[in-house]
Amino acid sequence: MTSARRQLIDANATPFYHVINHCVRRAFLCGEDKFSGRSYEHRRGWIVDKIKALSAIFCIDICAYAVMSNHYHLVLKIDVDKAKSLTQKDIISRWCQITKGHAVATKYMNGDALIDGERILLDELITEWHERLSSISWFMRCLNEEIARKANREDECKGAFWEGRFKSQALLDEQALLACMMYVDLNPIRAGIADSLQSSDFTSIQERINSLNSPNRSLAISTPQTDSSTNQAHIHHKSLVQFDGAAHLNQQTGIPFHFADYLELIDWTGRAIRLDKKGYIDNQRPKLLNELGIAPDAWLTSAKEFRRQYSGISGRWDSMCAFKKQHNCGKWCKGKASSEALHP
């Protein structure tokens, strides 16, 4: 039975979530259609640009992404602290970048006096918009609607573009976050359309690697600026979440690993799983594996079969059971065997 979004997405339980969405039609979301000869590769850029633009508006960060031929993966982080820090004007300004807003909000932003009824309405709107700005469901809605409209317009057709609502997984601990990010970043290699991390186009790992060679390594977030000639706000993109090496997931300052360790581990994991690929497995166990106490064989199984092992949530066995009990979304958890293997 399908679970309600409010049962599967709860920032108080974890700010990290894996989401995936598939295209409904035979025609590709991206890639090249061998039947018609048309290329849809440019649509990959649509998705990457849109998720970064939305991330700059929503209180939702991008940890990892991979845009495939007929689906895409995202690992998202709800920025709870940012959401709490927003002022009323911040909320209105951000929301009006997505929709037309409301006349009473425009009146407030212009500094005009509001009568009592307008003030009550404004408070209700701000409360609603504030909640939506940290909602993954609204983030995905804005993303999918625009991509569908652009694709339908380009294909000169109407109807559903996505096969259904997006699927989500709650990532309850460091183990789940790390396994999921690598699962997402390694998607092109697993599909056989790339043979290295550097050639894995439209993935977060390729972007992170490329940024190492960039003269400007700043990951600062740009703020909207206004063009005086057009009085329109420029669209700014938000950078990927940084690796901050924090000791615990709930510190919520970034991704709780060191980037150097992540690079070492994802390279080792990718080489080890694809035995038909050229290369070798380094005999030296990655430092991050030692720190987490994860057996190499169990880790490889987890990374290779991440989607099959876990259902709507992912994490240690006790974490998954506690989450299920708290949100009343099932009497059993999928992934017990792998979870116990990873944490003997």
Image: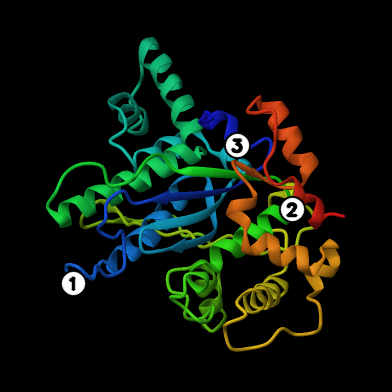
Which residue occupies 35% across, 21% down?
Answer: 113
- The image quarter in which residue 139 lies: top left
Q: If you read the primary sequence from the N terminus, does the residue marked by circle 1 or circle 3 appear first?
A: 1
The amino acid marked with disc number 3 is Lys
Q: Residue 158, can we see it?
A: yes
Name the residue at 71% across, 34% down.
Answer: 323
Report the residue at 46% width, 38% height from top.
137
Labels 2 & 1 near each other (Cβ < 8 A)? no
Q: Is residue 47 left or right of residue 180?
A: left
- Looking at the image, is 202 positioned above or below residue 305? below
Q: CA distance from mark 2 to mark 1?
A: 43 Å
Which colour scheme appears in the figure? rainbow
What percent of the width, then of the height, locates residue 56?
45, 52
Q: Which residue was labeled with disc 2?
A: 338
**Residue 84 numbered tag:** 3
**Mark earlier in primary sequence (2, 1):** 1
> Can residue 219 be seen in the rendering of this structure?
no
Tell me whether the residue at label 1 lies in contact with that at label 3, contact meaning CB atoms closer than 8 angstroms: no
Pick out the residue farthest to the left.
156
Q: Residue furthest bottom?
A: 279
Tell me the kind of residue under disc 1. Gly
Q: CA distance from mark 1 to mark 3?
A: 49 Å
Whole-angstrom CA distance, mark 3 to mark 2, is 36 Å
Residue that sits furthest to the top in the current view: 116
**Which residue is the site of mark 1?**
37
How packed mark 3 is, by other alpha carbons closer than 10 Å (few <14, some 14-19, many 20 or more), is: few
Count of picture labels: 3
Q: Secondary structure at mark 2?
A: helix
| Identity, as a three-letter code, of the amino acid under mark 2 | Ser
Instruction: State the SS at label 3.
Output: helix
Q: Position of residue 322 (x, y in %)?
A: 76, 33
> In front here: 239 or 291?
291
